[in-house]
Image (cartoon, rainbow, N blue to C red):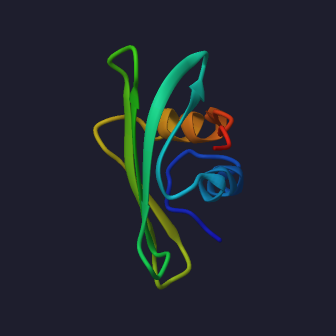
């Protein structure tokens, strides 16, 4: 899949990492800091969004991603760099889930 993300190498790794995140709310760690992450996906899989907030700080990561009819992927970070978004999704690790 081609990407319209500018100056991004290895975008397939980003899409694989994003695809591995569960829809809805989850918590995990990025660069030693804990984040709450909400992932939303449209039923047809063409629209995806992520909003992450550092739980003990002020950092936020947010973007929308669109799969276009042309086969391209358009990544739209929300008031932050594409690099920050890519690095976060690649480096974020879900916390282990406790069984009930």
Give above or below for 97 relative to 73: above
Identify the residue at horizontal 57%, vertical 55% (top origin). Answer: 22
* Residue 12 locus on image (x, y percent): 69, 57
* Closest to the observer, 61 or 36: 36
Q: Residue furthest left?
A: 79
* Residue 4 locus on image (x, y percent): 49, 61
| The N terminus: image quadrant | bottom right
Q: In the picture, residue 52 is in which quadrant?
A: top left
* Residue 95 locus on image (x, y percent): 64, 33
Identify the residue at horizontal 50%, vertical 50% (top origin). Answer: 6
| The C terminus: image quadrant | top right
Identify the residue at horizontal 50%, vertical 58% (top origin). Answer: 23
Q: In the picture, residue 91 is in which quadrant?
A: top right
* Closest to the observer, 93 or 97: 97
Give above or below for 66 relative to 20: below
* Residue 55 locus on image (x, y percent): 40, 22
Would residue 52 be found to the left or right of residue 14 on screen? left
Would residue 39 be found to the left or right of residue 91 on screen? left
Q: Residue furthest front?
A: 100
Q: How many marks?
A: 0
Identify the residue at horizontal 51%, vertical 67% (top origin). Answer: 73
Give above or below for 64 relative to 35: below
């Amino acid at each position: 899949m081609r990407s319209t993300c500018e100056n991004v190498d290895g975008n397939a790794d980003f899409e694989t990492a994003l695809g591995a995140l569960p829809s809805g709310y989850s918590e995990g760690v990025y660069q030693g800091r804990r984040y709450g992450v909400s992932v939303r996906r449209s039923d047809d899989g063409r629209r995806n969004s992520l909003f992450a907030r550092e739980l003990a700080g002020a950092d936020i990561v947010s973007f929308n991603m669109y799969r276009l009819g042309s086969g391209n992927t358009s990544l739209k970070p929300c008031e932050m760099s594409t690099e920050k978004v890519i690095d976060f999704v690649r480096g974020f690790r879900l916390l282990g889930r406790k069984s009930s």
